[in-house]
Amino acid sequence: MIPLRIRQAQGPLCRSFAVDPFKRLVRLRRRLTPSWTSGWGLPPATHRTGMRLACPAYPGYLLWLALVLLLPTGCRSDTGPAPISGEVPEAKGWTLEVLARDLENPWGIAWLPDGSALITERPGRLRRFRDGHLEPEPIAGLPPILSYGQGGLLDIALHPDFATNRLIYLSLVIGTPEANRTALARGRLTDAGLQGTEIIFLNADVKDGAQHFGSRLLFLPDRSLLMSIGDGGNPPLAFAGANIRNQAQNLGTHFGKILRLRDDGSPHPDNPFRDRPGARPEIWTLGHRNVQGLALDHQGRVWANEHGSRGGDELNLIEGGANYGWPEVSYSMEYWGPPVASKQSGPGFRDPVLVWTPSKAPSGLTFYTGDRYPGWRGNLFSGALKFQQIRRLVLDDTRVVAEDKLSIGQRVRDLRQGPDGYLYVLTDHHDGQLLRILPAAE
């Protein structure tokens, strides 16, 4: 592991085109998927499928993309105050064990007191991993779920008093492709499945499209529940006559926020904006694009990672009432070239602790408190979808002082510390896996 180095960075596509535009076009043709192209004005049928783009318009589209990306406005140095993470070395002394296969796009995992685990699958199933095996039948009792694009059944969390009340919480998407929203459900786990399942919170507004729903869940020591909600999507997706992502700065909507709720889904009475006219009382922080990881450290501080658009993924220390800037300040570039914002920092906005450029597509986040791995106690671990790896972050209080990677070779959707002190990983594929990280000596 080496100390983190601050560097001046340009967007990854800018650097690649400057070196060899033709090679970059070939790579783009091979790799373009709806996750890259959502919001670029593609035909609705193409926008809304989970299949790779395969159409005769590719050559013309790629030519247009090359011309846009070669514009001078498409490249700039990151000059803000946050440290920029670049290439990091491989972590030493670990290996992987496959525990379960054939999970369809698993999204979240929660460990039960008996040592078994519940795993969500984005298409809308809740599975149980028990005694070293994935049970074939899904758990019954889930509410109707819209599985669409990035949406579906998302995260899972146990009530702090689960041992006595058996309550579990699920973030999910409901509605239709044209009118959908992020929701929070609660049910009681029994031998027959979930009982008394109900929707206890809804995003106040519906949106179109298949992007940026959030939605991680995290119970705090005071038994309040944090829930992240994404900004709704990339341009040209719109809301109230403007880009929907602008709602991240609007206290009148839940888009682009982290919410703090009581365990019944109602607003926590101590929330910072509860007395502000027109503000949604559930809001705890604002100015987020799409938070995909939430973790609590040993001091009770909340950490989050979230997606930038092209470059500018962020690690943030979350404090109630703070504004994290999106999209007014950002290290991100638009997918078609220019900067998202004219500046990376400004008065009234909270700066990131760390910025990942190029984007690693951050996912699950956990603070390690065990003793299974020498030297890892007290480190943050952040998953990466695009880079198919986990980043290990060494902290000195609130600063990242060193970073290395665990190359998994699959899209990492979630990672959690299990009750046995090991780290467990979910990989986001149609045939996803549950993995366990072991010290190399074991």
Image: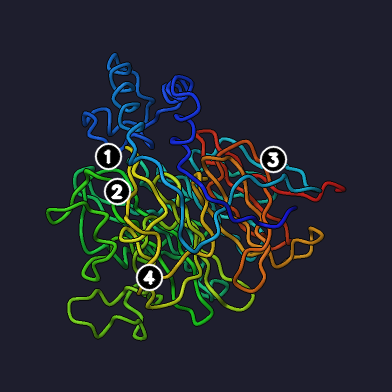
Separation of marks 1 and 4 at Cα, in angstroms: 27 Å
Please name the residue shown 61% across and 68% down the image.
Answer: 399
Label 3 environment density (alpha carbons within 10 Å; few <14, some 14–19, many ≥20): few
Residue 138, x across and y down, in percent: 49, 46
Residue occupying the far front of the picture: 72
Q: To which residue does mark 4 refer?
A: 349
The residue indicated by pointer 2 is 233
Q: Amino acid at mark 3?
A: Val
- Residue contact at pointers 3 and 2, CB within 8 angstroms: no
Of labels 3 and 2, earlier in sequence is 3
* Vertical position of residue 376 compared to residue 272: above or below: above
Helix, strand, or loop for circle 4? Answer: loop
- The CA span between labels 3 and 2 is 34 Å
Q: Which of pointers 1 and 3 lies earlier in the amino acid sequence?
A: 1
**Alpha carbon distance from label 2 to label 4:** 21 Å
Front tag of 3 and 2: 2
Disc on the earlier residue, 1 or 4: 1
**Residue topped by disc 3:** 98
Mark 1 sits on what residue? 39
Vertical comparison of 272 with 326: above or below: below
Q: Which sits earlier in the primary sequence, circle 2 or circle 1?
A: 1
User: What amino acid is at disc 2?
Assistant: Gly
